[in-house]
Image (spheres, rainbow, N blue to C red):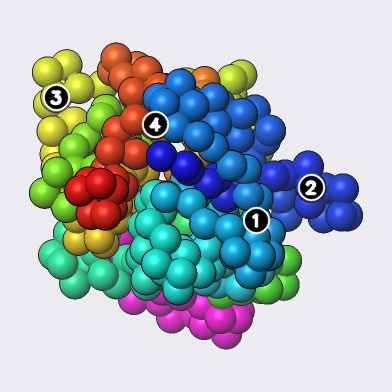
């Protein structure tokens, strides 16, 4: 099978003058090489394509692939993660991971929480604020947690994100709105433990690959899992693998994560983040349907490795899930 690979290479954007923060979600060359080498090792031919603009150029030139392994995040617009899936749908080319509708909706953390809440799944109270004016008279009490409504990799999350005094909330919201040029999500802050759950598969075939607790290592009280801590996780964060057999809470965490994955219609592989309230009850925080795949660095490969699934096996499972949507190749 000939597999194209779409991606946003971080160095390309840095060379164009974009900042470290603006490119934080993009991939390193090590990630591209790891995916390509793995796909080749599984017996496939690969073609590096690049970002959405390079993809459209190649399609106009008449190039086609049996499947595209898509990890491109996109640069502009709130539907940026949906751009490549939409283009590939237009040309009827199958691809890995979720469709444009899921990618667009789940990038908006507020819309995602509406769906989760309407499905009867636990998630903290929240409000989407377009400006400081929307940060008054909330239907829930502080402490609050504030972050941009459509960013990943912890972008916009700092020590300021935890707001204990309601009088401080409008200023924090306005600062984020001006910095990221988008609304902010205000949530009731959950004071309990935080987990990330790795999931592979689609629909009824989706399965939990493992769960790890996120423990921020700091002498500071109320330290959060910020962008800075994620970037320097090797010295600032402890990832603790846990299973239902070693911690009874994990079964509830994994049940909630898997239910959220299915309700949102996510495909092939990704992560669900869960956090507990003061009483220890797990709640949905957010989903990452386009999780990082850098070996020994990104959360999904790390959690899989903890529970005995190698990087090669993870890529193979993602590919097998996507291949279920390739009927022509199945009958060839």
- Provide residue 186's location: percent of width, then percent of height: 46, 66
Q: Residues within 10 Å of mark 4 (few under 14, many from 20)?
A: many
Residue visible at 15% across and 67% down? 119
Q: Residues within 10 Å of mark 2 (few under 14, many from 20)?
A: some
**Residues at marks 3 and 4, CA–CA distance in whole angstroms:** 25 Å
Residue visible at 55% across and 72% down? 78
- Work out whether residue 67 or residue 119 is closer to the camera in this orientation and state it: 67
Q: Residue furthest front?
A: 332
**Residues at marks 1 and 4, CA–CA distance in whole angstroms:** 20 Å
Mark nearest the camera among 3 and 4 is 4
Mark nearest the camera among 3 and 2 is 2
Query: Residue 315 bears which disc, if any?
Result: 4
- Provide residue 6's location: percent of width, then percent of height: 57, 50
- Please report the bounds of the magenta region as a residue range: 124-144
Mark 2 — residue?
12
- Work out whether residue 36 or residue 147 is closer to the camera in this orientation and state it: 36
Mark 3 — residue?
244
Pointers 1 and 2 in contact (CB under 8 A)? yes
Q: Residues within 10 Å of mark 3 (few under 14, many from 20)?
A: some
Q: Secondary structure at mark 2?
A: helix
Q: Residue furthest bottom?
A: 133
**Residues at marks 2 and 4, CA–CA distance in whole angstroms:** 25 Å
Residue 294 image-quadrant placement: top right
Mark 1 — residue?
51
- Provide residue 29's location: percent of width, then percent of height: 68, 33
Residue visible at 37% across and 63% down? 99
Pointers 3 and 2 in contact (CB under 8 A)? no
Residue 269 image-quadrant placement: top left
Q: Is residue 170 magenta?
A: no
């Amino acid at each position: 099978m000939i597999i194209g690979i779409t991606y946003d290479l971080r160095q390309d954007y840095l060379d164009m003058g974009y900042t470290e923060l603006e490119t934080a979600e993009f991939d390193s060359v090590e990630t591209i090489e790891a995916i390509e080498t793995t796909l080749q090792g599984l017996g496939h031919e690969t073609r590096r394509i690049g970002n959405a603009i390079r993809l459209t150029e190649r399609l106009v030139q008449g190039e086609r692939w049996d499947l595209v392994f898509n990890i491109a995040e996109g640069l502009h617009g709130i539907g940026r993660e949906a751009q490549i899936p939409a283009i590939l749908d237009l040309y009827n080319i199958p691809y890995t991971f979720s469709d444009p509708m899921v990618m667009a909706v789940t990038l908006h953390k507020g819309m995602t929480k509406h769906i989760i809440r309407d499905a009867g799944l636990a998630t903290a109270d929240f409000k989407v604020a377009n400006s400081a004016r929307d940060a008054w008279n909330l239907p829930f009490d502080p402490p609050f947690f504030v972050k941009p409504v459509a960013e990943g990799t912890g972008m916009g999350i700092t020590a300021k994100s935890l707001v204990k005094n309601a009088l401080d909330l409008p200023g924090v919201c306005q600062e984020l709105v001006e910095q990221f040029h988008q609304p902010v999500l205000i949530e009731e802050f959950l004071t309990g433990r935080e987990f990330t759950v790795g999931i592979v598969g689609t629909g009824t075939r989706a399965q939990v690959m493992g769960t790890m607790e996120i423990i921020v290592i700091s002498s500071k009280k109320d330290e959060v899992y910020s962008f800075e801590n994620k970037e320097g996780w090797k010295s600032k964060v402890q990832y603790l693998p846990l299973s239902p057999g070693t911690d009874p809470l994990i079964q509830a965490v994994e049940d909630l994560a898997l239910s959220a994955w299915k309700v949102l219609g996510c495909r092939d592989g990704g992560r669900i983040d869960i956090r507990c309230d003061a009483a220890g009850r797990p709640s949905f925080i957010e989903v990452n349907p386009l999780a990082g795949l850098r070996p020994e660095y990104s959360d999904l490969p790390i959690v899989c490795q903890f529970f005995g699934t190698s990087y090669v096996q993870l890529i193979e499972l993602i590919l097998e899930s996507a291949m279920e949507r390739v009927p022509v190749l199945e009958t060839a």
